[in-house]
């Protein structure tokens, strides 16, 4: 393969990634992720599925209006209403792309669409032609392509390109393929579709068997020129191919693949952290590229080798993906300028007001902890920039509990200028009784579906980061809280979720789509 070939990175975090259960984002959060993706220098970002809901339409429209650099894509089914709605959302983009899809596999034809092969081809052609009437950049996806008969897949792809498709995406919608299988599918298209040179072949692989990245790379080897992926690999079921893994595999093994991407890899870790904190889906410690342990070495043999020559046990430099060279940098005597510089190094953009708030919180934390790590600073920043507009804010708590005794809490919250205090003696423990007191004060009754506590950094004085997911009227809401006091962090996380309910409970549920 030519060393000059550049693989396009199509990020679908805002569309397929957001379909991961519990990962929905509001407009402000989507805009923040979209700007981070633009800073990451992805080639295309799929901003959403405009016909799914008014909120999705508004998000795609606003991203198309304010985000510059990448191509902005919107998903639509092969029908007139979807395509027209998608174009209405995208038309202000500098570089719009309409992404139309239609299932092609036998199982989808028979049970979902109840259409024969000729009807599928006719519908696909009509959809692509309608989309091409709006703009020149058209992507067509034969949904469940990996399980579609090769002859029919070639027929549909050829017809879509002839109708105006400039990118043909080959989805492994259910994560069924293997690398050899996926490579064979792409080679078949390259060899048998006469007009394949008129379009870019794209990969869209799901991770049900843990093979999404491997299948995407196999497609590149066979001739694909675009990979569709998400930050941290989030997405339906087991997720999608992880953008950070795909990008670093191509870059680190350029000797093998002979290709690269335009992605600014030093932005990978900050973008990963942003998406994790906005969605509430945290990255496992040993996650490749962006996990906390990705460049950690504990074994003595490894440490000895690293001290002598880093390449003995590291195939990438941590700073190349966005980890800081040094971790411990600030203390209680550090000033605002030092904090601002560290925030920039960690990939955050803070307004003057945000910096002042974070600096005040930093000084309070510095009095509690001897050592301030990058993780502590990131936690303070993320808590500030992702804070939902408070309906209720935390003031104080007192808890009495012990083995064999019913826990008792005295909790005070503030709403506007009014403070409310609730005293309760019930529950199974300190966190349970505190949550019940929050429910009593706010008047909201929820079901806690997930409660997770983890340390932000290391040591017995580390900040505790709590994430919760609660269910209210059939919808899931996330909350996050950080404090050196784990009970306080838990209350803040639960209250953060309650505030989201108060702000967003009237938002309609979106339609979901596979591709």
Image (spheres, helix red, strand yellow):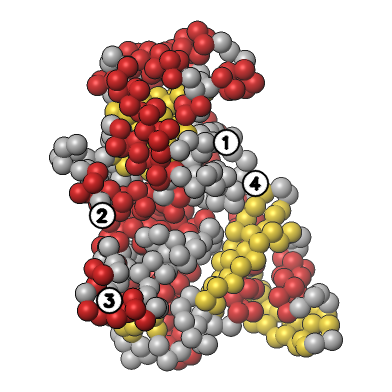
**Label 4 to label 2, Cα distance in Å?**
47 Å
Q: Residue at x 45, y 38 (%)?
A: 178
Of pointers 2 and 1, the one earlier in the residue sequence = 2
Which label is found at residue 306? 3
Whole-Å distance between the Cαs marked 3 and 2? 19 Å
Q: Which residue is mark 4?
A: 506
x, y (%) of residue 207? 50, 44
Marks 2, 1: nearer the viewer: 2
Residue 393 vs 3, above or below: the answer is below
- Is disc 4 in contact with disc 2, using a CB cutoff of under 8 Å? no
Q: In the displayed structure, does residue 296 sit left or right of residue 394?
A: left
Residue 446 left/right relative to 287: right
Quarter of the image with the N terminus is top left
Report whether 323 appears left or right of 508.
Answer: left
How packed mark 3 is, by other alpha carbons closer than 10 Å (few <14, some 14-19, many 20 or more), is some
Disc 1 target residue:
512
Q: Which callout, 4 or 3, points to the residue nearer the camera?
A: 3
Coordinates of residue 203 in the picture (x, y in percent): 38, 35
Task: Tell me residue 198's x, y (percent).
Answer: 25, 20
Q: Residue at x 22, y 49 (%)?
A: 254
Q: Nearer the viewer, mark 4 or mark 1?
A: 1
Disc 1 crowd, CA 10 A, few/some/many (<14, 14-19, 20+): some
Residue at 71% over, 47% down: 474
Question: Residue at 38% of width from left, 13% of height from top?
Answer: 159
In front here: 15 or 219?
219
Along the viewing direction, whichever of 420 and 422 lies nearer the viewer: 422
Q: Disc 2 designates what residue?
A: 252
Indicate the secondary structure of the residue bearing disc 2: helix
Q: Residue furthest top?
A: 118
Secondary structure beneath label 1: loop
Q: Pointers 4 and 1 in contact (CB under 8 A)?
A: no
């Amino acid at each position: 393969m030519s060393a000059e070939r550049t693989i396009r990175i199509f990020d679908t975090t805002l569309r397929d990634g957001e379909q991961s259960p519990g990962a929905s984002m509001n407009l402000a959060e989507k805009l923040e992720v979209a700007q981070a993706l633009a800073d990451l220098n992805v080639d295309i970002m799929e901003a959403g599925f405009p016909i799914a809901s008014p909120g999705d339409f508004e998000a795609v429209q606003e991203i198309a209006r304010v985000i510059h650099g990448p191509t902005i894509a919107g998903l639509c089914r092969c029908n007139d209403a979807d395509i027209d709605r998608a174009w209405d959302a995208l038309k202000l983009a500098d570089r719009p792309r309409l992404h139309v899809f239609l299932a092609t596999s036998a199982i989808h034809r028979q049970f979902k669409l109840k259409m024969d092969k000729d009807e599928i081809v006719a519908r696909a052609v009509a959809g692509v032609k309608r989309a091409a009437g709006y703009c020149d950049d058209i992507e067509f996806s034969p949904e469940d392509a990996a399980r579609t008969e090769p002859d029919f897949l070639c027929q549909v792809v050829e017809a879509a390109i002839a109708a105006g498709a400039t990118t043909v995406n080959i989805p492994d919608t259910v994560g069924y393929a293997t690398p050899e299988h996926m490579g064979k599918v792409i080679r078949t298209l390259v060899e048998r579709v006469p007009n394949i040179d008129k379009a870019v072949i794209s990969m869209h692989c799901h991770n049900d068997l843990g093979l999404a990245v491997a299948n995407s790379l196999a497609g590149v080897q066979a001739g694909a020129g675009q990979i569709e992926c998400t930050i941290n690999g989030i997405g339906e079921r087991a997720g999608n191919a992880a953008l950070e893994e795909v990008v670093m595999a191509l870059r680190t093994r350029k000797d093998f693949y002979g290709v690269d991407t335009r992605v600014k890899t030093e932005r990978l870790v900050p973008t990963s952290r942003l998406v994790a904190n906005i969605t509430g889906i945290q990255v496992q410690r040993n996650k490749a590229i962006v996990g906390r342990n990705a460049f950690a070495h504990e074994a003595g043999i490894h440490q000895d080798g690293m001290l002598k020559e880093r390449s003995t046990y590291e195939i990438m430099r941590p700073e190349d993906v966005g980890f800081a060279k040094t971790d411990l940098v600030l203390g209680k005597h550090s000033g605002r300028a030092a904090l601002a510089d560290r925030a920039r190094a960690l990939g955050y953009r803070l307004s003057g007001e945000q910096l002042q708030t974070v600096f005040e919180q930093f000084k309070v934390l510095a009095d509690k902890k001897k050592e301030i790590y990058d993780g502590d600073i990131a936690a303070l920043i993320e808590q500030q920039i992702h804070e939902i507009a408070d309906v209720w804010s935390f003031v104080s708590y007192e808890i009495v509990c012990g083995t064999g005794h019913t826990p008792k809490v005295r909790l005070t919250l503030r709403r506007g200028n009014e403070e409310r205090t609730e005293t309760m003696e019930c529950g199974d423990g300190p966190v349970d009784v505190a949550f019940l007191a929050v429910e009593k004060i706010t008047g909201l009754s929820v079901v806690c579906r997930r409660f997770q506590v983890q340390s932000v950094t290391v040591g017995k004085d580390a900040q505790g980061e709590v994430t919760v997911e609660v269910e209210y009227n059939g919808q899931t809401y996330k909350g996050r809280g950080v404090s050196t006091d784990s009970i306080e962090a838990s209350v803040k996380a639960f209250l953060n979720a309650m505030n989201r309910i108060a702000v967003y409970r009237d938002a309609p549920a979106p339609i979901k789509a596979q591709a």
